[in-house]
Amino acid sequence: MTAPRGALRLADGLSLMAARLSELGIVAMTVLLTYEVVARYVFRAPTHWTSDVATTVMIWLTFLAMGYCLREGHMIRITAVIGQLPPAGRKAAEALSLIAILLFSVFVLWVTSRAMMDSIAFGRRQPSMLRMPTWIAELPIILGFAILALQALAELIRLPGRPAPEFSSAAEQELPPVVPEAPR
Amino acid sequence: MTPFLIFGALLALLLTGIPVAFTLGILGAGLLAIDGLPLSMVASTLFGGINDFVLLAIPLFLLMSNLLLRGGIGRDLFVAMQSWVGHWPGGLGIAALLSCGVFSAISGSSITTAATVGTVAIPEMIKRGYSRSLTLGLMAAGGTLGIIIPPSVPLIIYGAITEQSIGQLFLAGVGPGVLLIVLFGIYVVIASAIQGTHQAMPRATWAERGLATRRALPTLLLAGTILGGIYGGIFTPTEASGIGATVALLILLASARLSRAVFLGAVRDTVKTTTVIFLIVIGAKIFGQAITLYQLPAQLAWLFEDYFNTATLALLLIAMMLIFIGFFLESMSMLLIMVPVLMPTVLALGIDPIWFGIFFVLLIEIALITPPVGLNLFVIQSLDRAPLGVVARGALPFVAIMLGSVVLITAFPQIVLVIPGL
Amino acid sequence: ERVLRMTVQVGANHPVGANTHYFADQLAEISGGEMTVRVFDSAQLFKGQEVPQAISSGAIDLGIVLADEYAGSVPAAGIFSVAFLFPDYDILARAADREGEFRQTFDTLLLEAGSKVLWWQDYGPVQMLSKGAPIVTPDDMRGKMVRATGKPTGDLIEAVGGSAVVVGGAEQFVAYQRGLVDVGMSGTTAVKSRALYEVMDHVTMTSHGLAEFIAVINPGLWDSLSEQEQAWMTEAAIRAEDQMRAGTEAENVEAAEWLAENGHATVTELTPEQIAVWQEATRPAVERFREEAGEAGDRLLTALDALR
Ligand code: NA
Ligand code: NA
């Protein structure tokens, strides 16, 4: 029993760590783009690298956060039908979703890792001024889907032992938090 | 037959509750496999799908508005607007509407706009005797201004997938955005006068106005900077998003509202929303490529060419189609699935793609406030704990006004195209 | 019967897109209907920058790519945008000779990057655009923000003391309209078709680079074709290339005349002496290319010199 539990913890830990990196990525992007405007207007010397680097950071942060988004139930889905099901039906629906995500992730890992090997073999680089090797922006897709696959598997293993998931009215996953009035 | 099978399968899979992004990706990959098409297309799409500089604006505009939302900027705006127009007939409604308009200029999302202003405006309006249905409908509809007045997440995505200029699209949204504010405003004044239940506010003193305005000033300036900066060519929309996020942070810092919780919360929400939106972008692209290879968009274009070959007739049909889809489909999915399907038709009929982007976003706004699936209805419902029916009934007149504005921009495309052409 | 799929990032009414449909028609005719090409235009499947990867991985059979898109992986492939190397249409036509050293070297480079070249699409020379006053001498570029499209144009701009700002095709119009950059670069026909003259009132016919599009096919697919099929495709490709080349010069000249005659923009032609000044001033950019493009770049430059 300890080995699977360890594996579950590993999946959670990886997802969380990756999500923290994604948060850092948001901050890095803000800094990069602000720096670009300052460089252009204050120093009249636009950089040749901020757009490439910031776009790459965006790709990393998007894919790295997938596992965490799954765990926290943020994925946008249509719950109009499954929300009405009895507990056993809701569990079955959740299992179906997780299996679909798991299988798709494995498929993506298979096709993208071959394609990334191809990029490395051809020494492919972006045609911009920075000439960044393209695998740098391809690797996060593989890492991200690996983390997502692990997390989906972990959720699937946990599903039978948990109460049936609640799917409230509809696409409310996207709602922002109701923020208490800030102190002044 | 094939189109019905494919869209039937899409609908069935969506209803099983598999996340939208994965439904689209799985169905797309499945369609490729069935027709013996190369699956490496999926890899190419995953690699290229969001590798686009212009998409950077989405996370950063989200960060900007999330910071301001959590920092409690909504109240400042509403109080300032109220101090100027609160004593008018229907004044609180106008103040709420104007707050939505200003917050729209710093937020790219309709739900953030609805939530930010709704949180403060709904209790105030109800306290002052405005009917619940009018109040909730107004806030649901006012929130949708968030995606027509620049910045706008759907317009950025539309520009990225159709390779149109984000700057042009943003400027094109200004005219229709102002039109909606004016029309909504007229309706609020008339409706609240007819209901006659609300109490007028006392006129604020000049000192009160000065104080309230000073407090809201940084936000007003930020809104002005972003729009003016894009209009004046000082920065690109993407750069504006970076500057906007930085300035929002500075505003919170200067007004001593930047706590660790506010900052981390805003960053976390931004990561979450960015990831789920971009996953749908990629899933929709895989699906879009598959149906393109099945030649569905081309067949639709030929159908229009043969039977409905005037722009007006085609737009009427497209609008009806989108209104119908908008009842059921979440707005981002609607944009990402339908734009690639419709684009060949739009181009074949010689419709201006910038104008069509605005037309599409107006229809998304309608989708946001029509039941059973309307995100803004859900936001307002969660703020007020009112039944969905009450919110939806209140939003109905606004749906009619939006439909009217769709007709107006079709009859007078200048409403959309004058400002970007200046 | 064989059906091939082709991705094109521009519309069927754009010269580059129209040429792919011409190719498809020719191939159907030559092969007696044995081979069909289904063209997916307007970037419905892939954007231009995604095409090299999509071609080499076999995600799509055929595609159109701007030569510069390969310049990241193979710097020598950026040669069409290197400063003032192709001053006129004749040099380009000679460089494009399928038996010639330049063509064979270039096509081999792309094959090594995973794309087998079918034919070249000359879209024409690239010019400078400006507001207020025409750009005449390299000094006019000093301290200006100039639109760059990639590494070679960036080097050119920096060689004459300007600041390179990368602006994509979609944002080009707005960047000029809103003054995000002071000086623009664009093909002559695009100044007309993209209505750039509405926002840039001066066009200087520098012809400092070429917009060269390349039609490519997945190499594995090519090798799997029968000799007969390869021969059909080559024949259709040669026809498409000739059709494009014949049309491009006429269209570019016509666009320039249309701009000047209708008062849309001033069109400034440069004298050979003025061009020589530009060539001298931008020599560092050519040297930069020589360093970065290595042996392949040397071979291309030498082959090009032999054609003058
Ligand atoms: Na907005
Ligand atoms: Na709806």
Image: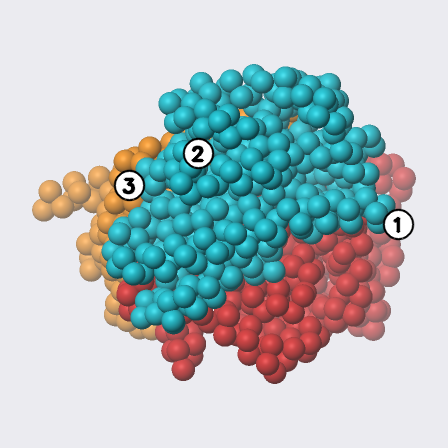
Chain colours: A orange, B red, C cyan
Residue B116, placed above or below residue B334: above
The residue labelled by disc 2 is C102
For the residues marked 2 and 1, what is the alpha-carbon distance in whole angstroms? 80 Å
Same-subunit check for callouts 2 and 1: no
Q: At which x and y percent is residue C4?
A: 37, 62
The image quadrant of residue B380 is bottom right
Characterize the local packing of mark 3: few (<14), some (14-19) or many (20 or more) Cα atoms within 10 angstroms: some
Characterize the local packing of mark 2: few (<14), some (14-19) or many (20 or more) Cα atoms within 10 angstroms: many
Q: At which x and y percent is residue C215?
A: 45, 50
Q: At which x and y percent is residue B192?
A: 80, 67
Residue A113 seen in this snapshot: yes
Query: Residue type at mark 1?
Result: Arg
Q: At which x and y percent is residue B115?
A: 60, 52
The residue labelled by disc 1 is B203
Q: Nearer the viewer, mark 3 or mark 2?
A: 2
Please tell me which residue is depicted at 40% across the width and 40% down the height of the picture.
C99
Label of residue A118 in the image: 3
Chain bearing tag 2 is C
Chain bearing tag 3 is A
Secondary structure at numbered mark 2: helix
Characterize the local packing of mark 1: few (<14), some (14-19) or many (20 or more) Cα atoms within 10 angstroms: some
Label of residue A96 in the image: none
Residue B185 seen in this snapshot: no
Secondary structure at numbered mark 1: loop
For the residues marked 1 and 3, what is the alpha-carbon distance in whole angstroms? 70 Å
Question: In the rendered view, does C229 fall on the left or right side of C22?
Answer: left
